[in-house]
């Protein structure tokens, strides 16, 4: 068993656990392994649209906030690619999303701790460790691996409103499938995008750019009252800091939940640059023609019926409170994501402290809290919005989360965490 016993085992290799793997690489005292069920790393491949950028500055790479001298920094990557001069002249903090994907792959290729095509199918409680059942996707065989600590980095899964789930298929799809099915979508005569987040806006813009070539009518519905811009003021951004995360974590549960609602504009909305691109293109194109688009907010798509090759959208104009039907032959549901919580968590259900029926209690250092104290910990990087705030899925905070986890596992301060990082105070003591 000892050769199969690790100090830490990470489930999922998305950016969050990948950052943990990169930060642990030089830490010899911690033996780590990470598994991902996919064959290889691709960062939200259905949304790697040409021309789209990472929504955080490149400094929020996998390691820099913990150690800017790390071999795995984005700057080192770009230097090794012999692209430092073009990047210098590019002169921007927001890097292409495609380049972030390439950078992450470059890091993975150097980390022997990261294994792909291996699905974690079960986690059982052991004697001061966890027994983790890992399935090899090629052979379908399972093996037991043991770990003192487990880090759940299983990310998110597409969220489709339950009333629309039944029609999801070739013509009605979630935004996460967009690039895989774009050719097919563009064959439609009437294409509808639903939602008002960044993904909806990027897809609408991409389809708008190619509209003249394909000739479809393009529609954009959202149930939100408007196509809202993401709040990106600098003081506002200070809420994506370690200081704010600590403050948020100290609030009572009800207060945290209502604060999340109030801070919605920080998380949900569209980058001003994307909104500008859309408007500018509409304006330019409208000089000589009526652009075949329909754009309407306050409109909820409540259900979708199939009629031959057509889809009939049952829509509700929320402010006028009237209902209407709308025909479309392709529909893209940019309706968001929800945390991916593995089913084996049920095993621990009665031992865990819950804040409500869906949300487990998470300690400040990202351990799922158990009723009885334990030495072997189950850390989570997913489903932490209720405990750690709006920045739960933000790449900029990923490194500080992992610093805390590493310090806890190693039982010493390997990566010091900075405080007093903001100009504003959250609580004068
Ligand atoms: C389209 C899109 C763009 C985004 N852009 C930004 C941005 O610009 N800036 C920002 O701050 N945030 C962004 N986010 C939010 C967030 O940063 C990303 O969702 C990020 O990928 C989260 O990383 P993760 O590691 O938690 O999960 P994921 O990237 O979702 O990775 C989870 C991994 O776990 C694996 N997995 C799941 N279950 C198992 C299992 N049982 N066994 C083995 N492996 C398993 C999956 O295969 C997957 O590879 C974006 C999100 C989306 C959807």
Image (cartoon, grey):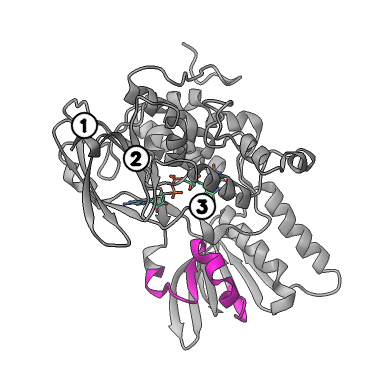
Q: Which residue is mark 2?
A: 33
Q: Residue furthest front?
A: 3
Q: Residue at x 35, y 50 (%)?
A: 340
Vertically, is 166 above or below 81?
below
Q: Secondary structure at mark 1?
A: loop
Q: Nearer the viewer, mark 3 or mark 2?
A: 2
Q: Residue at x 62, y 28 (%)?
A: 235
Kindly identify which numbered label has been placed on residue 43. Answer: 3
- Is residue 134 or residue 247 the one in the foreground? 134
Q: Residue at x 54, y 80 (%)?
A: 329
Q: CA distance from mark 2 to mark 1?
A: 24 Å
- Is residue 103 or residue 55 the one in the foreground? 103
| Mark 3 vs 2, N-terminal side | 2
Q: Residue furthest top?
A: 429
- Whether residue 353 is visible to the viewer of this picture, yes or no, is yes
Residue 4 position in % (x across, y down): 23, 39
- Is residue 144 or residue 196 the one in the foreground? 144
Vertically, is 55 above or below 162?
above
Q: Is mark 3 within 8 Å of ligand 1?
A: yes
Kindly identify which numbered label has been placed on residue 370. Answer: 1
Left or right placement of residue 344 versus residue 106 in this view: left
Q: Secondary structure at mark 2?
A: strand
Q: Quadrant of the N terminus?
A: top left
- The magenta stretch is 164-191
| Mark 1 vs 3, N-terminal side | 3
* Classed neighbour count for the residue bearing mark 1: other residues with Cα under 10 Å, few (<14), some (14–19), many (≥20): many
Kindly identify which numbered label has been placed on residue 338. Answer: none
Residue 181 position in % (x across, y down): 54, 71
């Amino acid at each position: 068993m000892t050769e199969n016993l690790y100090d830490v085992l990470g489930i999922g290799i998305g950016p969050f656990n990948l950052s943990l793997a990169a930060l642990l690489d030089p830490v010899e005292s911690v033996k780590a392994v990470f598994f991902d069920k996919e064959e290889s790393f691709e960062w939200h491949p259905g949304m790697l649209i040409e021309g789209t950028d990472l929504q955080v500055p490149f400094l929020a790479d996998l390691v820099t906030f913990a150690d800017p001298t790390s071999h795995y920094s984005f700057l080192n990557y770009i230097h090794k690619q012999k692209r430092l001069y073009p990047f210098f002249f590019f002169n921007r903090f927001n890097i292409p999303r495609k380049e972030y994907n390439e950078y992450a792959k470059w890091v993975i290729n150097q980390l022997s701790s990261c294994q792909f095509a291996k699905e974690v199918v079960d986690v059982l409680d052991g004697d001061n460790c966890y027994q983790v059942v890992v399935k090899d996707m090629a052979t379908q065989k399972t093996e037991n691996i043991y770990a003192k600590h487990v880090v759940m980095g299983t990310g998110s899964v597409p969220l489709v409103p339950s009333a629309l789930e039944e029609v999801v298929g070739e013509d009605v799809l979630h935004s996460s499938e967009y690039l895989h099915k774009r050719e097919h979508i563009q064959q439609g005569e009437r294409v509808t995008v639903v939602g008002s987040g960044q993904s909806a806006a990027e897809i609408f813009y991409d389809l708008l750019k190619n509209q003249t070539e394909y000739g479809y009518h393009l529609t954009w519905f959202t149930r939100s009252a408007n196509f809202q811009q993401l709040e990106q003021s600098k003081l506002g951004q200070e809420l994506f800091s370690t200081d704010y995360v600590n403050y948020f974590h100290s609030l009572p549960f009800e207060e945290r939940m209502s604060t999340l609602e109030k801070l919605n504009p920080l998380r949900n909305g569209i980058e001003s640059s994307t909104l500008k691109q859309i408007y500018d293109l509409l304006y330019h194109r409208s000089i000589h023609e009526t652009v075949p688009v329909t754009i309407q907010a306050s409109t909820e798509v409540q259900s979708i019926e199939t009629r031959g090759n057509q889809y009939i959208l049952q829509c509700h104009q929320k402010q006028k409170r009237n209902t209407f039907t709308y025909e479309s032959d392709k529909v893209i549901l940019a309706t968001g994501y929800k945390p991916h919580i593995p089913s084996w968590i049920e095993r621990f259900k009665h031992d865990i402290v819950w804040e409500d029926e869906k949300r487990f209690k998470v300690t400040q250092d990202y351990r799922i809290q158990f009723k009885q104290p334990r030495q072997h910990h189950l850390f989570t990087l997913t489903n932490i919005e209720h405990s750690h705030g709006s920045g739960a899925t933000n790449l900029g905070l990923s490194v500080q989360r992992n610093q805390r986890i590493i310090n806890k596992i190693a039982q010493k301060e390997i990566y010091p965490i900075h405080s007093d990082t903001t100009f504003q105070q959250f609580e004068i003591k």
